[in-house]
Amino acid sequence: MKKIKRYAVALMLVLSVICLAFGIAACGSVKLEELRVENARIDFTRGDGFETGDDFAVIAVYSDGTEKDVTAEASVRQESGMDMDVPGDYQITVSYGEKKVIYTVYVNDTDRILNKVELDASAVKKTYDLGDMVSLDGLVLYLTYDNTHGAPEKSTSLKDFTVEVTDEKGTVIDGILPALGKFTVTISQGNAKDSFDVTVDKINVSTVGGAITVGSLYKHKVLSGEAVVQEQISVQALCETYRYQYEYGDNYTRFSDIHVNPASTYHCSVDDEGIFIIHQEGNKIVTSNMSHPDMINGSPYYLWYFNDTVYGIENTLKNLYEHAKQCTNKDLKETANEATREYSFSFSGLEYRTNGYDYYETTVAFTLSEDYTIASVEYRQDYYEDNSAWKVDELDERTFLTDPVTGITTPQAERPSHYVIVKVTQTAGARTAVNEYSRDMFNIRSFDLSYNGQVLEDGDVLECDVATGSYEINIANVLPATASFTQDLMYFDYEGNRNSTGTDTMVSNEHFTVYRSDSVIHLTVKHGGKWTLLFKTKNVTKKLVIDVTGVAPVSMTAQILNDASGSFYEGDTKTLALNGTVYFYGAVEAFSNAAQTAEVVSGNGAAVTLERAEMGGVACFAFSASQTGVYEVLITSSVASAQKCKFTFTVSDAPDFSAILSGTYTAEDAAGNLYTLTFNRADEGGMVKGTVSVSRTPTKEDGTPITDQTVTETLTFYVDQLEIVVEHKAADKIWIELVVNAENKLILVDQRMLQYPLTAE
């Protein structure tokens, strides 16, 4: 009987477990009472994909008060009609066992905008050792959005947020925590942000890694140091010893390479523009474009067969320790004596160097001072050369042996082909050293440009010829004497260059090439024309105009200035008033030699004024006459006499513009367009001016006007001497000019420069 009861009890326990697992209410006395949904995402933007949320949970609540997370077993169903592309409210049904719970989601028509973030950092680590990094494990965010529903959304994801750690002065900390004290961690997205504080309250130097980190963080207490680097290439019996001395100031490092004579000293400073380095050989200041900006960290140290140079012993230690933890043999051995602050580590293995793997054995020992600075370091690297380009898993057994059990690789060579031994001592103290040299000592304050021994003033014109091609412009009188184009680069540019802000190498285009070699600027001209070259250093800009004579022209076209537009058009006749002026020239092919002469070949030359002029940057001639009549002017190329063009200028008494520019006129052009012009005068004083209403109507082949395609424009006009100036805008639909011929008849000129007589109505 007892046995039967035991079996029955066991069966009931098994059934109870099954009932709890599947939420079967009818089993035993414990029943599934309800389901509870937690942290469901309920707000979406149109087009989003549906999701339950990062921290979504379904909790089963039983009749005995127990609760169970059944998220993995529960089913989540979107009710029919749900469309994430259509704004609205939709129901989501969550089921488990025989229970269901429904919650509502909202699809909004606009993007959610985060307006508040609140942090729960109660589970986040708040106290750290010096050199640790902030951990955000356990951080919970509560997010409140515009146009959302219900309680703030809970999240543990920082994917779309900015994380910033700052010290008590507001300086942003990137990476490890660099000092004792309080730091603020801020989580933000747009204007929504919240923060919490963490504290660095302990220095941990009980490990090699901790000691290196703390020693690097306290580098600012190092005053001076001395380093001896011994390098030997055993196979060549060559040995070299390098000695360095260095001292630190505020944003200043001075270190000297004292194994050379005279000693080379580098003065490295930091200002608002960055790092600058002054190189001193003995008592002489020299320029050096080989100076490395990492010199601000202190003396150079050599790793990996002299190919890698690391500046600053603290950086060197960090570099070696990182390699120790990654090196192929995985045989890092380290010791740490916190009481005496003495530390050591060693490692070996293969390092990939340029085209193959080489083998190194490295030992390092260092100490910390009472100020937690790196007080002394001694390390040695033995190098076993492998001249092959094999990969690590293809190494030749004749070169390296690999233990099949430990995987440790060792060289067969009896001795290293190369080794480096470094010994460093450093002293802590107040940094009072200052840089006696300034950045400006290398910046150029003035210089001269000269050609053929003649100094070129700023903006001078250098006459050039394509036939000669090349020119050399000398740079002289550079001040101060210590200034250098190596340190203060010279940039080349030219006015009108829209595609560049200058280059320190050369400017090259279809017209010319400019570059500098030492103190000589080389100029090569390719086309005729005129350009303004710019030579710029940090504080000085020089302009030089090159006027380049091109090749002889092979054609010439007559051009006359349109006074109203200010541009030249193709034409060889013009009527002007007594003492009025017309501007004209013979246009030749682009970049050819445009030199030309003009002479009066018909008419009373004694009444003519003919002189050179420039209009809108175009070299031209100006003609005026004090006597009425017809004049012919011949232009001839100065270098190709066969190229000529003739102009005919009619000088007459002024016509009666007041009578002519009144009423309504009509004309028909060659395309069959009918023009109607109606003048509306608004004279001022003696000036004839006003507006003219112009309509243009196309016609059918039989001459019938197509009135629904009529275009109308109102243009402004005024009379200047014998010129009727019609003012146009870029948006004008009708472009015309008006002239009066020798018979005092009004003529319409269209945009193709074709002339049509106007008939008064």
Image (cartoon, grey):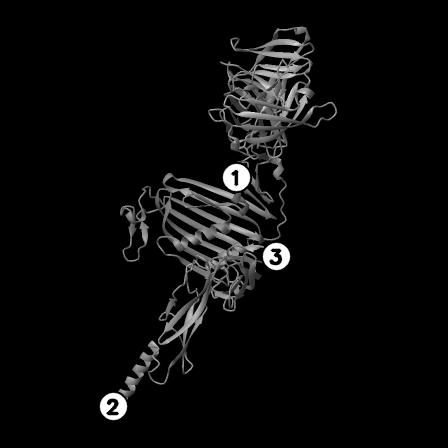
Q: Position of residue 296 (x, y in %)?
A: 55, 45
| Quarter of the image that includes the N terminus | bottom left
In this rendered view, identify the residue nearer to me: 225 or 320: 320
| Quarter of the image that includes the C terminus | top right
Marks 2 and 3, how far apart at CA:
78 Å
Labelled pair 2, 3 in contact (Cβ < 8 Å): no
Task: Name the N-terminal-most of marks 3 and 1.
Answer: 3
Q: Which mark is residue 4?
A: 2
Using the rendered view, name the quadrant where residue 326 is placed.
Answer: bottom left
Using the rendered view, name the quadrant where residue 545 is placed.
Answer: top right
Q: Secondary structure at mark 3?
A: loop
Marks 1 and 2, how far apart at CA:
93 Å
Nearer the observer: mark 3 or 1; the answer is: 3
Labelled pair 3, 1 in contact (Cβ < 8 Å): no
Nearer the observer: mark 1 or 2; the answer is: 2
Q: Position of residue 236 (x, y in %)?
A: 38, 39
Residue for badge 1 = 291
- Density class for disc 3 (Cα within 10 Å; few <14, some 14-19, many ≥20) is few
Q: Secondary structure at mark 2?
A: helix
- Density class for disc 2 (Cα within 10 Å; few <14, some 14-19, many ≥20) is few
Q: Which mark is residue 169?
A: 3
In this rendered view, identify the residue nearer to me: 338 or 575: 575
In the rendered image, the residue lying farthest to the right is 685
- Residue type indicated by callout 3: Lys
Q: Is residue 544 visible?
A: yes
Marks 3 and 1, how far apart at CA:
33 Å
Q: Secondary structure at mark 1?
A: loop
Q: Is residue 453 visible?
A: no
Labelled pair 1, 2 in contact (Cβ < 8 Å): no
Task: Name the N-terminal-most of marks 2 and 3.
Answer: 2
Nearer the observer: mark 2 or 3; the answer is: 2
